[in-house]
Each structure stands twice: as C-alpha cells, then as structure tokens.
Amino acid sequence: MAASLSASGALAPLAVSAGAAAVTLLVLVGLGTPLGYLLARERLPLARVWETGLLVMLLMPPLVVGLLLVFMVGPLTLIGHGLSDLHLSATNTFLALVIAEIYEAAPYYVLGAQAAFAAVDPRLEQQAALLGDRPPRTLWRVTLPLAGPGLASALATGWARAIGAFGAVIIVAYHPYGLPMQIWTTLNEVGLSSALPFALLLLVVALPVPVIVYGWSRHARR
Amino acid sequence: MLDVDLRVARRMFDVAAAFRVSDGERLALFGPSGSGKTTILEAIAGLVALAKGRIVLAGRELTVVGRNAGPGGRARSVELPLWAREVALLRQDPGLFPHLSVLENLTYAVGRRDGGGVARLVEILQLQGLLSASPRLISGGQAQRVALGRALMSRHRALLLDEPYRGLDAPLRRELTQLVRDQVRAHEVPAVLVAHELDEAQAFADRLGVLDHGRLLQLGSPSEVVRRPSTPRVAELVGYRGLVPVTAADGRPMLAAVHPERVRLGARPERGPVVEGRVVACRPAGTGWEVDVEIGPGLPRPEAAGPGGAHPVPARERLSFRISDPPAGPGSDVVLTLLDPPLFDRDWADDTPPPNPA
C-alpha cells in the first residue's frame, strides 16, 4: 500500500484535491453565506427561484451537472470565450475542478446556511438593534455566533461533497487528477488493490473535518 | 418627553392613539388582549410601521409619516432605524442572548466600559452569583431581571415595558415593579407599561390609559379612571360588572355601574344610590362572601345600551358583589347601597368610537 502511495507523483492528487476543496470552501463561505442569510430572512428578490435552482442542483445527478457545465463554461460558450481571453480555461484545469466542486457542494452549503440563519430568532436581532447595534455589528455579535454551529455543519457537509466530487468532475475536469479521479483511473487501469490506498487516503482527508465539526456543533448547541 | 400621535393599520382594526409622557412619568396602557397595546409600544420602538402619525422622543423625531410638514406642504416621512432610536424595550420574553453569559448580556450595550454602573445594577437587581451563568440555566424571574438590567444599561431616552412580568409570581412582580419605578425616577425618562391586568397597571403608573379595539378610551390618573370611568365600556374594562337603573341625587334617572367591591348591605343614602333586591345565591369567596342579588320588582327595567354601540354593556338585573359578613340566605330581601358609583345617562348610546379622522 505504502508503495503505491509513495510512487512518484502519487501524492499529487492529494494536493490537487485538498487545494481545490479549500478554494471551493472559500468561495462557498464568501458567497454562499450571504446568500443563505438573504434566503433565510426572505430579503432576496425571486427567493423562490433561487431556492428552486438550489434544489435542482441538489437533486440532479452529478453527471448531468457536469454535462450542463460543459454547455455553460465549455470552450465553445460565451463564458468559455471570456475565460480564454483571460488565458484561462474551464475544461480539464484546476479552475474546472473548482467549478465542478462548487456546483456539487453549493446547494448543500447554501441550504444548510439558510436553515442555520432561519433558526436564529429575529427578535434577538431586533433586541440587539434596540440596544444600539448597527446591522453589521448585530450580524457579528448575535446572528453569526448563534448560526455558527449550523453554519459549521453545513460547511462540513460542503467540504465532504467538494473533496469527494466525482460525477461532474469526470466530465469537465478529467485532469488534473484529484483523489476521486485517481481512484477511478487506478481502479480501471491497475486494479482494486492499487485503488484502495487512495480510497483510504481520501477518507483520511475528507472525514476528520466533518467529524470534528459535528462534534463541536453538537456541543455548542447544548 | 415622549410625544406620540399614531395610527397603525392592522387587519381587524386600526390602532390609533395620542398621548404624551413627560420625563420621569409612568404611563400604563391597560386593555384586553388584542386591543392594540403592544402595537403602540412596537410602533414607538420602530418594530411596526405607522400608517400615519408622528413619534417624537426628547425632541428627536423617531417616526413621521404623512404629515404635511415638508417643504411645499408635501407629505414627508422619517423613520429612524432601531439602533438610533435610543428606546429600551422590555418584553414578556426576556430575549436574552443565549450564547452570552448573564454579565455579557447585562453589559451588551456598553461593552467593558462603565464597570461601576454594572456593579451597582447587579446589586440592585440581586444578580450576584449569576454573572457567569448561561441565560439558559436561570429562572424566569432572574431572566427578567437580567433583561431589565440590560435595558437600563443601554443608552435610552424612554423605557417601554410590554407585560414584562407576565408569568411571574406576585411577590416578584411587586419587587420588579418597585424596582422599575425607582429606576424611572432615577433616570428621569418617560416610561410606558402595557398591562392587561389592572392591578399591575395601577401599581406602576402615574397615569392610566384604557385601550379597547385600538382606541384610547380614557386617559387619566389611575384613581380617576377607576372611580370615574368615562363610558360604560371603560367601566366594564376596569372591573364594573353591570349597570343598574338608579335615581341620581338631582332626581334624574341614571344608570349606575356596579363594582363588586363597592356594594354595601343596608341603606346608606349619604354614600350612594340605594337599591332593593332579593338574594339569589351566596358563596364563600376569599375571606368573605360573594352574593348574587336580583334587583327587586318595582324598579324599571334597565335599558340595554342603544343600537350602534360598538360594545353594548348589558344592563343587568342581577348583581354580584362581595361582602365580608355572611349574608342572609337565598330568597331573603336585601337593601343595598352602591358606594359612590359612576353614573351614566339612561339613554347612553355608547362607546361608539369617534369617527376616523380622514
């Protein structure tokens, strides 16, 4: 097992997977958190449309998501042209991997964040405002701490979905290999015994974050 | 000074009220559930929008809607955000921040500054020993005291209390009421309490407003409102149980509102109108007796409140009242004196609320 993992370049997929999942999480936290908040407080125009879109993303088979992504960001599309003007490509690149992971993880994170914010009693936010806090301060002192455990759970789920993303990835980001692709190709080309170590590695990387976060959020909610 | 003149649109009826509360003055708004009391407080705090009106606190306009006071007589509107209103609101639900300790809740508005103020308040509110506790682990009474302390620590120019003692036992209510009275005096801010129990409102207030169906029916000193309700509906709300026909001192036929605690056995014409009746039932109540009496024959039937009355008060022929000594049994004739009762014209047509100002 150690032999197959230490083979030259075999640990590269680990770096690719961890890197792409980390970037995905940053994007989710940066964009998904405000989106979840606005959805929870029903302050978003066309909120139903957003929610439906997220649900569709959640329910669609990842392979189909991958195919749709080809039509959205592939080289022949408007976005693809725009990217190539910037010397970027969303096909078989790290960027493509991140986009595919975002598509697979976003609905889990955003809907989780929405639930976490919806569970915060708006009267507590009103109370903070009446005590003199402006909205950003209320968000920082009341909303985020109270939604924290729920947000952390959503983030853990997002992380697990991102790092294990496969269906959309195989369509738009066959290269560079992340761990799931590595497992798939090793299984195809070499065999089960060689693929297992990578599977184990994926578990070791993917699981601790959610496990620790779930433990903490359970503790914090008490 | 808190100056309120507002109209808030609600589904069933509009809430409209106008009053002023000076610094250090305590106003209680009393009325049945759903009469619009809480709506008034929430409008002052900025939690509900006005359809029309103006709320001014300490010379600052908190809310102005639809006044022709803008340039060129146009309507203008002002709506200060919650955080700028400087209004402390204490609700029935203490609304403590569950992720903060008792001390952090108390000092929420001031942070770590002003340690002296907190120490004094902690002592007054008897919260020593609880400061590091989580709000989830303290009793309802303690939580209410923390919420009060938190409100008092904040920068506020008015104190609004929305039935904050509901669900607490009587001694604790008395204690908190006294505490709030002292604090209002010390801070010299206008205070408005909303209560659906008369005792609570009386114990707190310098002035009492009676609210029903979104209308302020009467505003006056607590004793004036209780002894001289302006309409039969107010009388009913403050505890009078019915109307009986009597003849006033000047000979005019009137209706007297009967309060169960203001009826005496025997004819005492110098203390109020005398009526005759027959005991229907009596039962022990508290330390005395509650007696049902049918007003005797020979008296004219009381007129019901006229048509068009929004809340006709049923004129009753049967009275219930309390006395301290055991009465003669059912069937016996009695003579009763109604102690200085509020009197209304026989043809009182009611409590129709004043027409809506356009």
Image (cartoon, rainbow, N blue to C red):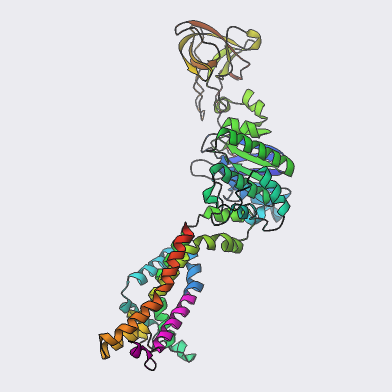
In the foreground, B66 or B330: B330
Q: Is residue B220 above or below residue A108?
A: above
Left or right placement of residue A90 versus residue B178 in this view: left
Q: Position of residue B341 (x, y in %)?
A: 61, 18
Count of numbered tags: 0
Which residue is found at the position 69% from the left and 43% from the top? Answer: B3
Instruction: Identify the residue at image location x=51%, y=38%.
Output: B34
In depth, the one of B6 and A126 nearer the eye is A126
At x 57% / y 41%, what residue is drawn? B141
Is A83 part of what is drawn in magenta?
A: no
Find residue B269 and report its image quarter: top right
Residue placed at 54% from the left, 38% from the top?
A: B166
Residue B310 image position (x, y, % from top left): 51, 30
Residue B97 in the image: x percent, y percent? 56, 54
Magenta stretch? Answer: A1-27
- Name the outermost residue toward the bottom: A8
Q: Above or below — where is B344 with respect to B10? A: above
Query: Does residue A8 show up magenta in the picture?
Result: yes
- Residue A43 seen in render: no
Nearer-the-camera pick, B301 or B279: B279
Q: Quadrant of the N terminus of chain A?
A: bottom left
- The percent coordinates of residue B128 (x first, y second) are 64, 47
Main SS of the magenta segment?
Answer: helix
Image: A48 above or below B89: below
Image position of B158 (left or right of A97): right
Q: Is residue A47 visible?
A: yes
The front one of B118 and B290 is B118
Examine the rendered structure and indicate whether residue A97 appears above or below residue B254.
Answer: below
